[in-house]
Image (tube, grey):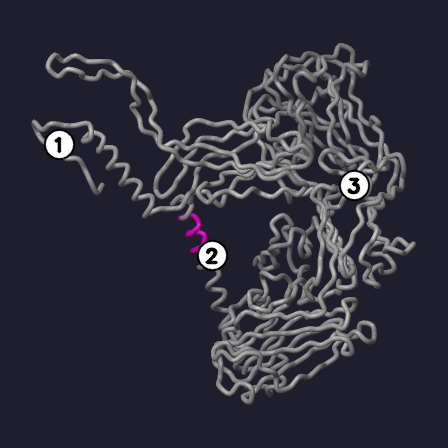
Amino acid sequence: MEKRVIIRDRQEVQAGDLNNFGIYAGESFDRIVREGLTDEKKFSGMAVAKTGVTSVTISPGTYWTNGERYIREVAHSIEFLSQLPLATKKIAAIVVIGSAIETNIEPRDFLIDAETGATEPDSVAMQALRYAEFQVVYGTENSAPQRPTVSTDNVVIAWVTLGTTGVDAVERASENDFMSLKRLDLRATELEVWKQAAGEQLTTLGTDISNINDRLRQMADSSVLARIFADVAAIKDTLELEDDYSGYGSENFLALDQSITDNTVSGYYAKVEEGVRFPDANASATAIQLFNPQEPSVLVAGNGLCLPRYTEVRRLNIDAYYQPLSLSQYEYQEVQFKTIAISAKRLRFGLARTVCNNSEFWKTGTFDYSKGIFTDKLGRTYQALGTDFDSAYTNSKEKFIRLQQFWYDTEVEYYQERVATDFTVNGAMVAQTFLNTQAGWLTSFDLYFTQVAATGNVRVLLTKTAGGKPDLSKVIAETTIAAANLVMGSNPKTASHWTRISLAPTALEAGERYGIVLITSGDHYVGLTQGANYGAGTLFYSTDGAFFQGDLTLDMMMRANFASFTNTRVEVDLASLNLSGGINDIDIAFEGITPAGTELHFEVRPEGSGTWFRIGGDGNPFLGLPALVRFRAVFVGTKDLMPGFKLTGSDVTVSRPATTFRHHTKTRNLPAASQSVKVICILDYFNEANHDFDVKLNDVQHGTLNIAPATVVDEVIGENDGTRKRIRRTCEWTSAQIPVATNQIAIRSDGAIAAATEVFHVERMTYLTF
C-alpha cells in the first residue's frame, strides 16, 4: 500500500485519520486493478435469465471501471410488460452503471457540549458503497429488430429480445465479460499445448518440401517444374503452410475470410464465394411476406410458421383415469433447458450461379452451420464471416447441391442446435414420454388436472429424448399456462374437463419418442392411467433438474392433436420482387421442414409473362432481366402431412451482377528475392468472344504497381457448352518487367463481361517464383 496513516502514542486522532484507513487501501486496490488487470469497463457475474413471461432477473455481480469496482449483492428483477412491442419485435439493452452511495443508516451520539459532555442522537449513514445500478435502453420495433445504440459510458450486460407476448430471448454481452487471471492462464496453457504439437509437424513438413524442391531442380527443366510447382502449391495451400516456406502458393477462393484476398485495397470490387466472381451491381433483400396478409389458404402461427390451412384431429388418446398425481410433492428446483430451432435452408438460382470445381473441397470435412466454421479432415478450421447462410456444408446432418444456375443447401433433420436459447425456471418437474407413430404437425395437446391451485403457472415443454428420457437441451416447443386457465376435471369423458395446451405447430417424426415436461410451483394434480401401454412411453419425475426417474406402471393422461390439412396442394402468393435494372439471381434463405413424401418449392413469374417458372426447374425466368416478378410458394403433401416454413427470419434477395470486377491479393512474402514470376489462373465458363480477364503484378517492395506480363498463354482444359470453356491462363513476368529482384508481390486481376446474363469465375490462382 503506497500510503498509510501514522498514529502515535498520546496523539489526537481525528475522523479524517480513521477514514483514511479505508481510503488509502481503496486507492491501492483501484490502482492494482487499473494497472495490473484492466482499466476498461467490464462486468463479472450478473447473469441475466428469463424468470417470467415478461420479466428477467439479474444475479449479483461486479461492475469494473477504471480500476473501481461497483457491486450488486442481491438479485434484481426487470419487468418489460409496459414496453412490449405492439406487432413485431424489438431489442432492449440492459446496461450497468456505477454510483457512490452512503448506506447502512444507524443511530449514533454526537457531542454537542465539550464541557458538560452532553450528546445528541442522530441516525447517520455508516457505510460508503460503490453501488452497481441497472438501466434499460430500448431499440425500435421492427420485423427484423436492431440493437439500440448505447452510450460508450455504459456497459451492456445482456441483450433482451421482446416479442408481443413477452421475453423471447436473452443473450449475454460476453464481449464485456471481465477476463480473470485464471481464465487467461487456461487460454495460455491451451496455446502452449497447441504450439508444441503443431510446431513439430510444421517443421517436418517444411524440411520435406525443401528436399523435394532441391531434387526437382536437378531432375527437370523449368517448364516441367512450373507445372509441378503449381500442384505442390495447391498441396501447400491445403496444408496451410506459411508463404515463406516456398516461393509459390495456391488459392481456391472458397470463402473471403480464409483466402489470400485483400478487400481493403482501394478499387477492390469483387465477390469471393466458391471462386472469384462478379459483385452485385444492384441487390435488394426483403423478408418473405404473404401477398395477402389474410390469405385464406394458409395459417400463420405466432412464431411466423406458415402452413397450409388445417383442422385439428386427435391421434393419441390416453384418458382412462386411475389415480391423481400431486406435482408439488417433488423437489422444488432450478431447471435449465434449451430451445432449438427449425432446420435452415438456402436456395440460390440464377444466371450467375456457375458451378465451381473448388466446391468439392467442402466434401473433405464438416461444416458447423451454427458457427459458420468448416473443419477439414486434418482438424484445421476456416471461419466463414458475414453471411448468415453462407457456403456449403457436408456433415451427416446437412447436404448441398451444386448444379448449373441452382445451388441448394439444407439441413436434413427437422431441428438443429444451430440456434439455441437458454432458459432457467423454478418448480417441481414431471414428464411423460410417448412414441409418435405417424409423422405430422402437433398443434395442441390436452392434459387432465384433477385438482388445481389458485396460483402457480405451469411451464410446458415438448422435448426430444435421449435414451428414452426427455432431453432438456433439445426443447422443440414450449409454452406457459396460467394457473387461472387450468381446468379442474371430474369426468375425463367430457371434453370441457380437459385443459387445452396450444402450441405453435411442431413437426414430429414417425418412430421418434418425444417428452412432455411440466414444471410448476403450484399445488396441482394431474390424472394418471394404469398400465403404461397406451403411448409406449414412461412417466418420469426429477429431483435434481437433470436426471429423471421413470415409473413403468403409470402414464400421464393426455390427448395429442395434429393438423389435418384441407388440401394436398396449395399455391400461396407471396409479395412480389423487384429490382431496378432487372433481376438476374434470386437467393432464398428460410427455416423450414419438408418431411419425406412432401415438397416445398418456390415459383416466379416475370411481369408480362403468363408462365410460372419453378426455381431450380426447367427454364430460366431471368433471361430477359425482368425488373418485377411475381413470387409464390407451392406446398405439396397429403391430408396428414405437409411442408412448412417460417416467414419470421426469412430472407429473399434479388440481384444482378456487375459487368466488371477487380480483385487484389494480400502481399505475398517470398523466401528469396526474384525477377521471375508466373501466375496461373483457372477460368471457368469463359467465353473468349464476350469475356476479358487480365492479370497485373505489383512489386510491393519497390512500390511499382500494375506491371503487365511479358506473355499470356491459354490452354483449354475443359468444354462446357462449346463456347464457354474451362481454361488455364498462364501469365509470366521476367527481368525485363522486374528489373530489380523483389521479395514482396501482390496480384491484381480484372474481369469484364459483355452482359450480366453470361458470367465466368476464377476457380483457382497459383503463383510461382524462381
Which mark lies nearer to you, 2 or 3? 3
- The residue that disc 1 covers is 7
Task: Locate residue 62 relative to residue 414 in the image: left or right.
Answer: left
What residue is disc 2 on? 194
Looking at the image, tell me whether mark 1 or mark 2 is earlier in sequence order. 1
* Spatial separation of the CA atoms under disc 1 and disc 2: 55 Å
* Mark 2 / mark 3, whichever is N-terminal: 2
| Above or below: residue 385 compared with residue 716 | above
Question: What amino acid type is highlighted by mark number 1?
Answer: Ile
Q: Position of residue 471 (x, y in %)?
A: 64, 34
Dot 1 crowding, Cα within 10 Å, few <14, some 14–19, many 20+: few
**Residue 576, can we see it?**
yes
Amino acid type at mark 2: Trp
- Which contiguous range is marked in magenta? 185-194
| Depth order, front residue of 621/230 | 621
| Residue closest to the eye, 63 or 144 | 144
Which residue position is annotated with label 3? 644
Q: Quadrant of residue 549?
A: top right
- Which callout, 3 or 1, points at the residue further toward the start of the chain? 1
